Image (cartoon, grey):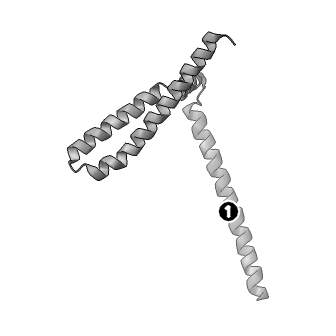
Amino acid sequence: MNKKSKLNKNKNNNKKYINIFIIILLIIAIPIINYFIINTLLKISLFIIIIFNLGFIFIKTNYYKQMISFIQETKTELKNITWSKRKEIIQSTLAVLAIILCTSIVLWIIDSILTYIISKII
């Protein structure tokens, strides 16, 4: 490994630790603000600033880039899907309803027979 790559790696690690430190500070700041500051408008303003800073830090991370990449790939895949026609969906739905109806009738008949047999035994 040459010196430049070591320096870049150290810079990335330093940025990572600085970001983590800032996030921890901002998370700790929320309850402190709630406890010590009475003015509601000031609380809301500081809370918005904290959320904005957390969002800004999040945008700078690799996780954000991976998430955006995943969303873009998902959109591309959704464009490739061939959706069923309305007629096919209605036919499939009717077939499922018919099977459910037949199954429920068969189970009702079996239940009635078993109930009759058990009532004769008892």
Q: Position of residue 82 (x, y in %)?
A: 60, 25
Q: Quadrant of residue 23?
A: top left
**Residue at the extreme bottom of the image, as rendered:** 122
Q: Position of residue 60 (x, y in %)?
A: 47, 24
Q: Residue at x 36, y 32 (%)?
A: 52
Nearer to me, 28 or 45: 28
In-image side of 16 versus 28 (left or right): right
Q: Residue at x 58, y 15 (%)?
A: 7
Q: Quadrant of residue 44?
A: top left
The reply to whether residue 96 is visible in this rendering is: yes
Nearer to me, 9 or 109: 9
Residue type for callout 1: Ile
Nearer to me, 42 or 36: 36
In-image side of 80 versus 31 (left or right): right
Label 1 environment density (alpha carbons within 10 Å; few <14, some 14–19, many ≥20): few
In this picture, is 49 found above or below 98?
above
Question: Which quadrant: the C terminus?
Answer: bottom right
Task: Name the residue tied to disc 1.
Answer: 105
